[in-house]
């Protein structure tokens, strides 16, 4: 059975789509609906909240960073064991990277066009009545390959306000169902930090938050009518391998400092025959296996603790000496270096396996899609093998010496320069790898 799906999108960031999505997922789960979720774009934090709401892994879908076969495989995977798929968009519906004309920009609209899932638009209704209909009409008519079938208005108060918006939308867009109005819910705000929302595992009372969001959706949105809008995607296939496994037994760091690993990546390694074991650097656990993966996260918040965890650091060095493949991304890359300087300017000794020193005392945003090609053959493939991924961090590189891992460009094919380092079978970069390039 292929489950029907829909995409919850918005005109812009900050419209409340994450809250509405979490409330919908939690509400449906409490009703006994087997709901699976997806998230458009390179995001680790929102999917973890999805997982908390449904009890199922959330898969990322990316029309820029993923090959069409990869998107099709993930759509097939997320649709195979559910009654309904709810996909949360990214930014505004049509927003994405700056790319050459004719190329997908990674927008929610690109994923909607690929998957064929209809869109439910969430519009912030503050300060609008008739103008809300103009916003809806403009979004519904911009691209003929995107089907907006429903609309939800957020931060609306009062019956008169609701009635005026509803009447205007019915006149302008009679084929689009006005599904409901979420009131101002200022108490349902997720705390944020420099990379976005705090992680789900750090939320002070996540169960109560999800319960309140579920109740709000159940009270204010016509959920049965929303579910009826969903359609199966014609774009389904068997999953494909996106990044080759690092070994036969891969130790994956997983805790509050290393939480940014895509479920599709780990599941792909398992399908390829690799055994995955999890370990916690924060708990001073040492990795075991012929491959070690240090994903991104927030090691800068725990730098002192990590520097004092000798069992972890010595275990990592022992694995390198034994010839294990060790790969670090973003936060994991920083920990493979010599020194991590925290936001207060204190220097902490890390594993010292790569010639890298990074600092958060001098913060600078690095953000964007990356096309990365291997400079030399290694565990990730032959020289010239291309990958697509994403970079998002505030760390400043103080020193980076040694053999570079990738040569990189951005989404517009503009040169970014060398990215990352390698030393024998130890390697890392600030690029989160998503998929092999076309």
Image (spheres, rainbow, N blue to C red):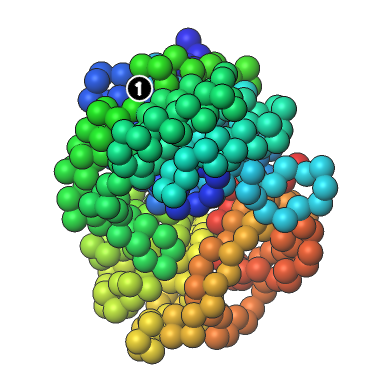
Helix, strand or loop under label 1: loop
Examine the image and state in which quarter residue 154 appears. top left
Most foreground residue, 306 or 4:
4
Q: Residue sitting at 40 percent across and 51 percent down?
A: 45
Q: Is residue 34 visible?
A: no
Q: Is residue 201 left or right of residue 390?
A: left
Q: Percent x, y for residue 28?
A: 30, 24
119 vs 64: above or below: above
230 vs 161: above or below: above
Quadrant of image for the C terminus: top right
- Mark 1 closeness class: few <14, some 14–19, many ≥20 residues within 10 Å: some
Q: Is residue 223 left or right of residue 115?
A: left
Most foreground residue, 192 or 51:
192
Q: Percent x, y for residue 429?
A: 58, 66
Examine the image and state in which quarter residue 208 appears. top left
Q: Is residue 202 visible?
A: yes
Examine the image and state in which quarter residue 213 appears. top left
120 vs 429: above or below: above
Q: Residue sitting at 30 percent across and 54 percent down?
A: 190
Question: Which residue was labeled with disc 1?
Answer: 222
Q: Residue sitting at 53 percent across and 16 percent down?
A: 231
Looking at the image, which residue sits at the far right? 101
Most foreground residue, 352 or 13:
13
Q: Percent x, y for residue 13?
A: 50, 52
Q: How many marks?
A: 1
Q: Percent x, y for residue 237?
A: 61, 21
Q: Residue sitting at 79 percent across and 64 percent down?
A: 414
């Amino acid at each position: 059975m292929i489950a029907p799906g829909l995409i919850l999108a918005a005109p812009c960031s900050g419209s409340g789509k994450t809250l509405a999505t979490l409330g919908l997922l939690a509400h449906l789960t409490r009703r006994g609906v087997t709901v699976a979720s997806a998230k458009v774009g390179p995001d680790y934090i929102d999917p973890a909240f999805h997982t908390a709401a449904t009890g199922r892994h959330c898969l990322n879908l990316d029309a820029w960073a993923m090959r069409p076969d990869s998107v099709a495989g993930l759509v097939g995977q997320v649709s195979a064991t559910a009654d309904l798929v709810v996909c949360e968009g990214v930014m505004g519906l049509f927003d994405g990277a700056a790319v050459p004309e004719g190329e997908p920009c990674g927008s929610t609209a690109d994923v909607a066009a690929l998957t064929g899932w209809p869109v439910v638009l969430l519009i912030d209704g503050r300060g609008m009545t008739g103008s809300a209909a103009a916003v809806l009409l403009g979004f519904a008519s911009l691209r003929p390959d995107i089907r907006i079938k429903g609309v939800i208005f957020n931060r609306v108060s009062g019956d008169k306000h609701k009635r005026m918006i509803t009447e205007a939308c019915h006149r302008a867009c009679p084929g689009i169902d006005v599904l409901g109005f979420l009131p101002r819910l200022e108490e349902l705000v997720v705390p944020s930090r420099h990379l976005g929302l705090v992680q789900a595992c750090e939320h002070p009372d996540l169960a109560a938050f999800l319960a309140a969001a579920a109740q709000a959706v159940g009270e204010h949105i016509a959920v049965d009518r929303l579910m009826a809008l969903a359609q199966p995607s014609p774009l389904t296939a068997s999953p494909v391998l996106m990044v080759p496994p690092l070994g036969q037994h891969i130790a994956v760091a997983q805790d509050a400092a290393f939480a940014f690993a895509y479920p599709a990546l780990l599941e792909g390694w398992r399908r390829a025959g690799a055994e995955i074991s999890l370990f916690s650097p924060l708990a001073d656990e040492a990795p075991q296996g012929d491959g070690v993966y240090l994903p991104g996260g927030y090691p800068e918040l725990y730098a002192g603790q990590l520097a004092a965890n000798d069992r972890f650091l010595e275990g990592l060095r022992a694995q390198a000496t034994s010839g294990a493949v060790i790969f670090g991304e973003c936060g994991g890359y920083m920990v493979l270096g010599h020194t991590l300087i925290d936001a207060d300017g204190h220097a902490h000794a890390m594993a010292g396996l790569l010639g890298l020193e990074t600092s958060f005392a001098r913060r600078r945003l690095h953000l964007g899609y990356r096309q990365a090609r291997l400079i030399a053959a290694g565990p990730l493939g032959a020289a010239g093998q291309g990958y697509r991924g994403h970079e998002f961090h505030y760390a400043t590189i103080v020193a980076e010496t040694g053999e570079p891992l990738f040569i990189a460009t951005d989404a517009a094919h503009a040169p970014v320069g060398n990215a990352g380092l390698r030393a024998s079978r130890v390697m890392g970069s600030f690029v989160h790898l998503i998929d092999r390039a076309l």
